[in-house]
Image: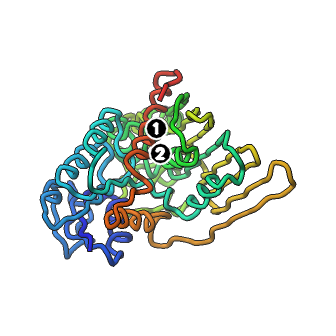
Amino acid sequence: MIKFGIIGLGNRGYKYALHTIAVQPECEITVVCDASGNHFEHFPQVKQTTDYRDVLADPEVDAVFIATPDATHAEIVIAAIQAKKHILCEKPLEVTEEKLAAIKAVATDYEKVLEVGYVLRYARSFQKFQQYLADGVIGDLHQINVLDHIPYGGYAYFHDWHRTRAKAQSLLLQKATHSLDIVNWIANSTPQHIAAFGRLSTMGRPGALKKFGHEVPADLHCRACPYSATCEESIQNIAKEKKINWSADWPDQCVFNSEVDVDDHQTVTVEYANGIQLSYQLCLFGAYYQREFHVFGSKGELHFDDVTNEIKIIDRLKNESVTYRNEYVESQMEPGDEEQLADFLASITTGSRPISNLDSSLMAAKLAIKAQQSIDQKKMITY
């Protein structure tokens, strides 16, 4: 039995704890922590605290799941290493190169397990996607095009702390990092050169000036806004029109607030050490959801649609194609959650290396950071 301490009970933290960890027969949650006391009511039978150090000092705790705001990860991960706990940390590992280096310095030869929550590596369709390419079904890989088209970008990232660079650094670290990690995985190489472009145009002050002709009050919230019934970004309209309602107490600060300073769309190009080229686009104000990967190889092409869970392989010479479709639907958890926890537990009991490990997670975070540097400095960046 692995006894868990949960650190951070925001939307991701408490749901993963309830729907993934708590239902696993090999796991027991013994203590939960949230600095604001959020969602303690879901864990009435376990110890509760607002200080993560209480969790790390608890001798009963074998492993911790860290789901706090991203800029706090280094502090807590390093403390957890010092307390000799197994660590499952939400992605990204951190938001600055300095903090990533601090984690790497103490975690490189860590004897316990450190796994980071890049769950797409564990999702069934993504596992199949990676395996097809590793098996060489389209030959040597040369180009990869990726599109992340998000209709809930305002809802997920611009109503709360994600909307400022001080706390999130860049939404490339929040959303794009999943797809960038998958590309790192299938490219099986290290990024070398990064050229990226991005803007804040639809949210924040630019969006307010276009929509209202003026900045919005700093204390404006959806629930008290006179435009809530017609605004495309109000939490009420998102729930009504797009059926997105992740929590009854979801933050509702206006997405057009002038404090918003993260980009709402970005384009990233990458050249890897083995010559593979990536073209990636993220749009956080899309009208519908789409995540797709198009990979070009010496023997053909592979197209993977994350919406339909369909992978299509097209031969370059013959007029032939093969289609794979995964029709499994995860009802209680996010795709990959269950498999990720299984990998974490297996790593604890057998000493195997996690699929999403320290090295791969450092690379994914650093690539996103370097891409944002390219945007800000308006030049190509060397990894």
Nearer to me, 23 or 106: 106
The residue at 19%/72% (across/down) is 46
Which quadrant is the N terminus positioned in? bottom left
Q: Amino acid at mark 2?
A: Thr
Nearer to me, 159 or 254: 159
Looking at the rendered structure, the secondary structure element under dot 1 is helix
Nearer to me, 146 or 236: 146
Q: Is residue 231 above or below residue 383?
A: below
- Name the spot of residue 108 as percent of width and height, x first: 31, 44
Q: Which mark is residue 368?
A: 1
Q: Is residue 248 above or below residue 74?
A: below
The coloring applied to the image is rainbow
- Name the spot of residue 211 as percent of width and height, x first: 52, 38
Residue ranking furthest to the bottom: 25
The residue at 40%/38% (across/down) is 257
- Name the spot of residue 203 as percent of width and height, x first: 48, 39
Q: Is residue 244 above or below residue 20?
A: above
The residue singled out by tag 2 in the image is: 177
Q: CA distance from mark 1 to mark 2?
A: 6 Å
Q: Which mark is residue 26?
A: none
